[in-house]
Image (tube, rainbow, N blue to C red):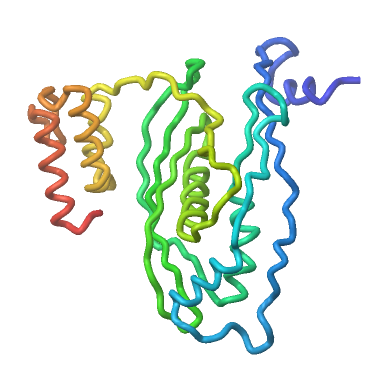
């Protein structure tokens, strides 16, 4: 009788042993079971119609503290640590926001990406996300706030992780939620030396019409950090131009055209 792995290999057109399987153990993540925060549901008349800042302060009054109850790895193992995850934030703030008629909606997202490596040399992708949220109160008035998130991922979940981190930061920091642990949150990936992109490797992203003016500013900063602003490249019209001048020119054109 064949095993599941053997049947999967056969379905993929491989024979057993034709492709090496990565046996590197991956750290375990042991989330704590979510606890009922004890926040009641809104009554039949709905939330009291108060201004958004009053409603948000009442949400803050419901969420008085969230401890670091989630574990990365197993307690006592080397490299394990406790943290407050996005699920813990949503578990507390979701009922509190429903009780007081508050909506927290993302209305604008700006992301940036770059190739990096872990300390073990594994290629990875870094995503930074700046998100503008609109906090809407029970009367329809609102306030807008920004929060940033960052992640590293070797697959396709980097953006989702960065957005989750951004939301977690908004709720914990915007809600002034304390924890009994005074240590800062740790990260589960140690950053290695990032590969330096050459000016030519930036060209496709610089010339792409969907690259925002904000991202072009970041590219200019990255090129300046690697002393490449004066590098000559072939621009989008086939001419030779310094890459720094090209970034500035296209950034001004896109800003004038309304691109953010």
Whether residue 63 is visible here, answered yes or no, is yes
Q: In which quadrant of the rendered image does the C terminus lie?
A: bottom left
Q: Residue at x 12, y 48 (%)?
A: 252
Q: Residue at x 72, y 31 (%)?
A: 75
- Report whether 132 appears left or right of 218: right
User: Eyeballing the image, is 96 above or below 185?
Assistant: below
Residue 114 percent location from the top left of the image:
36, 32
Residue 126 percent location from the top left of the image:
42, 33
Residue toward you, 186 or 221: 186
Residue toward you, 195 or 67: 67
User: Eyeballing the image, is 123 above or below 216?
Assistant: above
Q: Residue at x 63, y 49 (%)?
A: 67
Residue 13 percent location from the top left of the image:
68, 20
Q: In which quadrant of the rendered image does the N terminus lie?
A: top right
Q: Residue at x 49, y 24 (%)?
A: 190
- Report whether 255 appears left or right of 214: left
């Amino acid at each position: 009788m064949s095993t599941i792995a053997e049947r999967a290999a056969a379905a993929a057109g491989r024979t057993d042993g034709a492709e090496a399987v990565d046996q590197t153990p991956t750290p375990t993540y042991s989330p704590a079971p979510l606890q009922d925060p004890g926040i009641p549901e809104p009554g039949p008349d709905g939330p009291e119609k108060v201004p958004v800042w009053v409603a948000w302060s009442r949400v803050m009054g419901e969420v008085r503290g969230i401890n670091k109850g989630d574990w990365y790895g197993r307690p006592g193992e080397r490299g394990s640590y406790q943290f407050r995850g996005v699920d813990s934030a949503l578990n507390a703030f979701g009922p509190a926001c429903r009780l007081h008629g508050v909506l927290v909606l993302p209305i604008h997202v700006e992301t940036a990406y770059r190739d990096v490596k872990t300390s073990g040399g594994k290629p990875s992708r870094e995503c930074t996300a700046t998100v503008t949220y609109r906090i809407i109160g029970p009367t329809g008035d609102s306030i807008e706030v920004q929060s940033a998130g960052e992640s590293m991922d070797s697959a396709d979940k980097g953006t989702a992780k960065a957005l989750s981190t951004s939301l977690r930061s908004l709720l914990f920091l915007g809600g002034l939620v304390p924890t009994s642990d005074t240590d800062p949150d740790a990260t589960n990936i140690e950053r290695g030396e990032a590969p330096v992109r050459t000016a030519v490797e930036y060209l496709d992203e610089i010339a792409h019409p969907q690259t925002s003016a904000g991202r072009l500013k970041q590219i200019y900063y990255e090129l300046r950090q690697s002393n490449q602003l004066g590098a000559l490249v072939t621009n989008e019209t086939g001419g030779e131009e310094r890459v720094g001048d090209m970034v500035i020119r296209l950034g001004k054109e896109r800003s004038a055209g309304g691109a953010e």
